[in-house]
Amino acid sequence: MDLIVMAEKKQKKQKAPLHWAQQMALEIKKRISYEPKLAEIYEKQGILVYDEKTPSGTIHIGSGRGWLIHDVVAKCLRDLGLKAQFILSSDDFDPYDKPNKDLDPAIYNEHLGKPFCDIPSPVEGFDSFGDYYFKQSTVRFAELGIECGFESTADNYRKGLFNPQIKTILDNVDKVHDVYRDLYGDESEGSKKMPFNVLCPECGKIATTVASKWDKEKEELYFECKKDVVEWADGCGHSGWISPYNGGGKFPWKVEWAAKWPTRGVIVEFGGKDHFSKGGSRTCANQIAMDVLDFPPPYPSHGYKTGPGYEFFQIGGAKMSTSKGKGMSFSEGVDFFPSEMLRFLLLKSKPNSVVDFDPEKNDILLLSDHYDRMERIHFGIDEASEFDHTIQSSLFRLTSIGEPRDFFAPQIPINLASTLLQVTLSTEKAIDKLVEMGHIEAGLEEKQLDVIRARFALAKKWVDNFASEQFIFKLVSEGQGCTQLNSEQIAIAQAFCEFLEKQAKGLSSKELHNSIYDFARSIETEVKEVFLSAYMSLINKDRGPQLANFIMTIGVEQTIKLIKISIEASQ
RNA sequence: GGGCCAGUAGCUCAGUCGGUAGAGCAACGCACUUUUAAUGCGUGUGUCCCAGGUUCGAUUCCUGGCUGGCUCACCA
């Protein structure tokens, strides 16, 4: 008996380790196999992995996490041989409900209450306000390797796709009210009002109308466009009977969420944990889907059970908010991180852990370090356990843009890259330097060099924007020498130049490093005084990159020249 | 007040349905008569948040608590 139990356990332990996205894909596959309704949808259109975003303003980098999660789960489903596609919908039929800080209130406040798809774009070349903000992010999807189709919720309403669900919901208002009463109590607004917001045909606002009656026979709603429905926008006073179909209006959010699932055949849809806590919008939407629309809520929900929402992705601690206009936007994030690095950052962590990336701490150094390690394990350069190797390889695959890279490129630590850049002031010269120093071989393939260039690009962004003072320096130059050397330091610097001239040629950096100590002894000076004079005269700071390597990087001749500039400037 | 999630080394985390834990970074030591950012090698530093319970055995499962994040009319 015990033996059998042990053997079984051993079997289980040998189960292939999986990345969380692969695990989810397996669960989804299983679900399709036992839910007949889902099997039917799968037969017809494959697995729709769906997400939505309201284009109310600049979208912050945090949203990228959800998109990446949807992206890799769809990929893993395809890896299992299933047909799966990720589609992101723009919720552009939602009303403009608070002033966008980037826009002129004198021009835009009159549009408050209208749907985003009907407000002019702040920038030429876009169909609307909604189109503009949505595309600010989505044009970057390809370079981030997110494979995704796009659609507009307003289009779907206007094409009549929602019509069947609109009829079902309005015919069964009581059931919708029951759900609200159950979750939010008898007094909640949702348990009383008609769950539909008419688009006023007179003033074009969708937030200012109240529907009060549904005529089942004529299939029309009676509505009024009022002044006091919301504080931030006034209705025009228009009223009458109107068809809710084909873009006549929209559901309120929670109902709409539920209605999208049968409308589009959604099988998978994740969401941030703000939506997923008990009693939140996902709970409500699930219940409406189950009780009113007779449709199984998408994974990771299961029936009435909400399932887990993913945690936030924050840059520098503060939760970033689109409306506050703080933090990093999605497109800024894509500008900042090399794409593979951003994917790596978000995909290495399980969705239920907070990712807080602070570029002002040493997170960039750590991230590139972890990334490099993953690569070395994947390519078999570093030893790792079977478990680790499998996980890191999966991660490498999911982190890749398009087909995973099948070659290894030499890795350049960020701080080395940043020193080289600050000395040479150009990526190509820095690469030449790396060859000269023997850090990389000459004649690397162009595609390998591209990987190295991307690393330099990250190093440059780090130095320019986030690196602390101690990592930043500028070499002295003609007319801009250090003027702060005292007479003692000048003497040391002079002796140091002579030493370099006579002894530094042809030494390895290691030998040079050691000989600096010999030099200090030979002139009976404390070594730290030598360093101080050298750093002062080279970069006008009291410390800097490891000196021997630094001198090799600058070049011995050039170093002597620079020190002499400072000696002269200080005299 | 209710709920969800998290709490493992100094930091970031891993730990695959229970067998008293392990990576990277940092730190420390050595190579080297050397504090000065890119070298190599070596060393794991722990009340697995706390207290009970189940079990031969608990970081893992259960109950209660602590701390932190998020959430619970409308809007999204």
Image (spheres, helix red, strand yellow):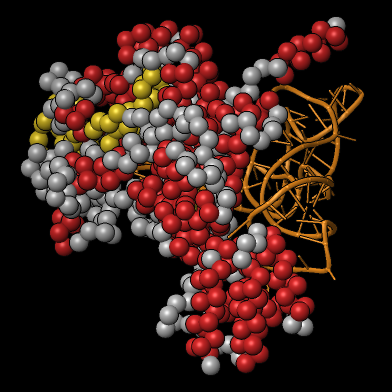
- Using the rendered view, name the quadrant where residue A2 is placed: top right
Inspect this view and state whether residue A71 appears: yes
* Picture layout, residue A385 above or below residue A426: above
Q: Out of A544 and A254, give the one closest to the viewer.
A: A544
Which sits in the foreground, A267 or B20? B20
Viewed as shown, does residue A170 lie left or right of A389?
Answer: left
Q: Check the picture and name the quadrant holding the N terminus of chain A.
A: top right
Position in image of residue A563 (x %, y %): 54, 79
Judged left or right of residue A535, residue A524 is right
Taking the image as shown, residue A285 lies to the left or right of residue A241, namely right
Residue under the point 21% across and 27% down: A156
Q: Percent x, y for residue A421?
A: 47, 60
Q: Is residue A474 above or below residue A248?
A: below
- Marks counted in the figure total 0
Q: Please name the residue shown 48% across and 65% down the image.
A: A423
Of A240 and A198, the residue lying toward us: A198
Question: Which residue is depicted at the point 26% across and 42% down?
Answer: A135
**Residue depicted at x 50% and y 60%:** A420
Q: What is the x, y in percent for residue A525?
A: 75, 82
